[in-house]
Image: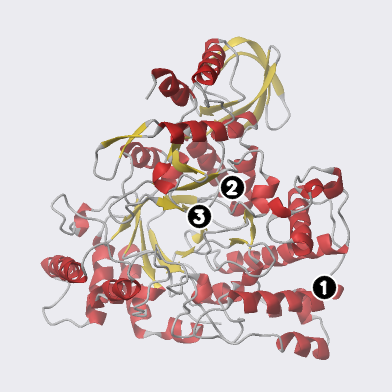
Amino acid sequence: MDADLVALAEAHGVATRYENWQRLDTEVADESVIGVLGMLGVDASTPAAVERSLAEARRRAGDDRLPATIVLRAGADRELPAPAELTLEDGTTRSVDRLTGDLPLGWHRLRCRDQEVTLVVVPVELPEPPDTWGWMLQLYTLHSAGSWGMGDLGDLRDFVTGSAGAGMVVLNPLHAITPVAPVPASPYSPSSRRFANLLYLRIADTAEYQRADPDLQKRVDDLRPDTAELIDYNAVFRAKTAALELLWPLAGPVDLDRDPGLTDFARFCVLAEEHGADWREWPEELRRPDSPAVRELRGDRVGFHIWVQDLLEAQFQGVFREARDMPIGIVYDLAVAVEPSGADSWLLQDVLAMDARIGAPPDAFNQLGQEWGGVAWRPDRLVETGYAAYRDMLRRIFGYARGLRVDHVMGLWRLWWVPAGLGPAKGTYVHYDPEAMLGILALEASRAGAVVIGEDLGTVLPVVTEGLQRTNMLGSAVLWFTRDDDGGYRPSAGYPRNALASVSTHDLPTAAGFLAGEQVEVRAELGQLAGPVEQEWASWRKDRGQLLDRLRAEKLLPEDADPEAAVTAMHEFLARTPCRLVTASLHDVLLERRQPNLPGTFEEYPNWRIPLGRDLTEVVADPLFRKVAGILQSRSGSGGGSSSIA
């Protein structure tokens, strides 16, 4: 690659080479680098353009102007090019010649010569999280006499009550959808990460339903869809939307000016209902949220969508009250990106890389690479805007969670961007400022009293693990993946301290499924195997044998154990690890064989649509559920909530 193009890419955080899954140095194609630079507003289309853009980058790097955002760790100092005026978050001002270590944590403004920049003082680390245990819950899979075709916030509240002394509940993402059918099944393809999904609302728990007359309540009740073999999200959406419209006349007045960000989201919902789910296909005058035509949009339907989010907020608060005695409580899952057609992409289009699609480079399981379809932050625009959109997202999430699991946490350091039309193998990494991304996350988590868990599975840079450890954020230790260098399963004593331990994840085989070879059988039926089926079965038998040998070596499993005894032993094994947090999945303790999501499939497999085989009352009364809870409870001695179901 031309030296000037390499230098230009480095100046903008775009990788020209990377280490692949085989640890081999891999050069990125010129067209990929040029395409990604173009998404960052950098012209590299010709040698002359590269020369001009590089000269501009060097000019900016050579002056003594401050960056638009300065992130400073508590206790650190920084020189300034001239005397400055500092306005603290509380409104007080002071004159400063340099930034010193006694500055309070928070979001401040700094005026230096002709510049005014954002100064964020962030904590060095979060408080150490408590040692506790909990449940990993795909909320949509629950069902009960009170829920409508899928798990909802009423089910979550009741599950917390019946969680058998758990200290936390780790959820799937509950991010907002665009309120237009068809709605996506995947919780990792959100319209907005800042607001909540109306499908999780418990209709009968709303104040409006409870004060409705019996005739109206019956009309609402008659809309309830039954629990089916597979979750029908569109049926749930249509039923709950119809019910909410019946109840809307009973709502009190809605203040459209109380929360401008929420009102903007409500405007998006109204426009999507009228013009379709993809804002990029709307009339030109509606494609920007700051256009006069959009700003003039007010009225009843905007109020309706604000009211729906207020109802969700009230039910989240009910869950938190139920979880108030848990050492941690509710842990939310943050999807790595948003849909390009959705609300956040419309509202935040100036700080998102709208033409890029994030994914992953080729690896052993996906030899053509992966394209996940979402759009992510532009690192340069985050700096220019003081990371305001990132801060706002975190604040809204921490408003209804006391923990955050960050999916693909390596994305705080770098993300694989794929230029449109090139295919996932032709992408490259774009680097972010981890001091800013991690520091701001730590600041907002500390203010909320929340823990942070990074999903750091797979091939992860050492700097990611080090950064999480340095800030007292936790990594992930999954039984299937935690191996020694020889490929065998690591002893329980060798697990990391700063981690959340689990048997599996939503993207991997369940415990019972693994023991039965379900993942081989299903992938063979769907044509998803990377090699011959005989080879896959042989690999599974070896892997299963190694796992059972590890459990026997720790004297947790007899030779003739059945699947239930093996699943029990897996959780006894996790209970022995030094990990701060240990979790059990309902899919594992209920001996469910089908995993929630089978990566690489779409319509071939019912991803995200498989309900649990038993209803909520049966779940919390299940003997193995109780047994595993007792094993994990005795490990930590932690508690929270009662052990009876409402």
Residue identifier under label 1: 248
Q: Identify the image's colour scheme: rainbow, by chain, secondary structure or one colour.
A: secondary structure
Q: Quadrant of residue 253?
A: bottom right
Question: Camera-side residue: 490 or 381?
Answer: 381
Question: Camera-side residue: 4 or 354?
Answer: 4
> Residue 627: x percent and y percent?
32, 79
Question: Camera-side residue: 196 or 129?
Answer: 196
Q: Which mark is residue 403?
A: 3
User: Which kind of residue does numbered mark 2 sit on?
Assistant: Leu
> Residue 558: x percent and y percent?
13, 78
> Residue 236: x percent and y percent?
63, 77
> Residue 35: x percent and y percent?
50, 35
SS at mark 2? helix
Q: Which residue corresponds to the image point at 47% horizontal and 42% vertical from the top-left?
A: 417
SS at mark 1? helix
Q: Which image quarter is the N terminus in?
A: top left
